[in-house]
């Protein structure tokens, strides 16, 4: 079983810039730049929750009950594994050498598998395994960027979202990126 991830290194950049939002919304002044920055953060947060995927690169730490949980990581996209730590049977903290495992990842699903001829080490019963990983897109897909820009421009213009009973452009652009629905 996986436990909630904790961010150890926060994102250093948002997927869209204030200038991109201004171009989308046809804004010529800087009077509302701080508001636009808040909208960008809100849009990223909303897309990440809606799609159950991470956009902005960050390093997270996530814990699980056993090495067998590695068959499906709970976070995506995973770019690289920073470290894997565990408590050995003697009660000592250990780092798993990267010669033992490899990351198998795409934009939607990731797993950690044993390299040929390797086996998972014995660990203290009841202890957890901790994976530290770099997650998020190196380059966010254009459809997601476009959805964010539409949402931000609409939120800037209307300051409130009015929903209709239909399938919105926001939904249409993001539906192919949803995980675990």
Image (tube, grey):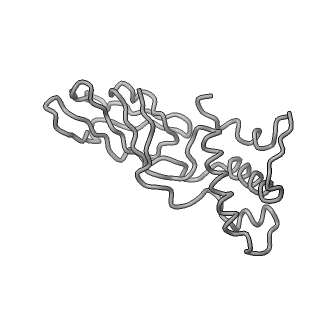
Residue 111 at x, y = what percent?
43, 32
Give the residue drawn at x 21%, y 40%. 94
Closest to the observer, 12 or 139: 12
| Residue 85, quarter of the rendered image | top left
| Residue 31, quarter of the rendered image | bottom right
Give the residue drawn at x 22%, y 34%. 87
Q: Total number of numbered labels?
A: 0
Q: Quadrant of the C terminus?
A: top right
Q: Quadrant of the N terminus?
A: top left
Left or right: 108 in relation to 70: right
Q: Is residue 71 above or below residue 161?
A: above
Left or right: 67 in relation to 27: left
Give the residue drawn at x 75%, y 66%. 22
Give the residue drawn at x 58%, y 49%. 55
Residue 154 at x, y = what percent?
80, 54
| Residue 89, quarter of the rendered image | top left
Residue 102 at x, y = what percent?
36, 37
Residue 132 at x, y = what percent?
37, 44
Residue at the extreme left: 90
Closest to the observer, 50 or 31: 31
Left or right: 30 in relation to 41: right
């Amino acid at each position: 079983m996986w436990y909630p991830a904790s961010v150890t290194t926060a994102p250093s950049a948002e997927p869209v810039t204030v200038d991109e939002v201004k171009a989308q919304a046809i804004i010529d002044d800087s009077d509302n730049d701080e508001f636009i920055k808040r909208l960008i953060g809100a849009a990223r947060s909303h897309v990440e929750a809606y799609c159950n995927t991470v956009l902005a690169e960050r390093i997270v730490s996530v814990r699980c009950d056993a090495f067998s949980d590695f068959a499906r990581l709970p976070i995506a996209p995973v770019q690289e594994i920073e470290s894997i730590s565990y408590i050995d049977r003697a009660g000592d903290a250990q780092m798993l050498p990267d010669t033992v495992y490899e990351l198998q990842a795409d934009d939607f699903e990731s797993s950690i598998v044993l390299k040929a001829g390797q086996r998972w080490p014995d660990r203290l019963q009841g202890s957890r395994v901790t994976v530290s990983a770099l997650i998020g897109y190196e380059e966010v897909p254009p459809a997601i960027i476009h959805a964010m820009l539409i949402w931000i421009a609409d939120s800037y213009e209307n300051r409130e979202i009015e929903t209709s009973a239909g399938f919105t452009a926001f939904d249409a652009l993001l539906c192919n990126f949803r995980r675990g629905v």
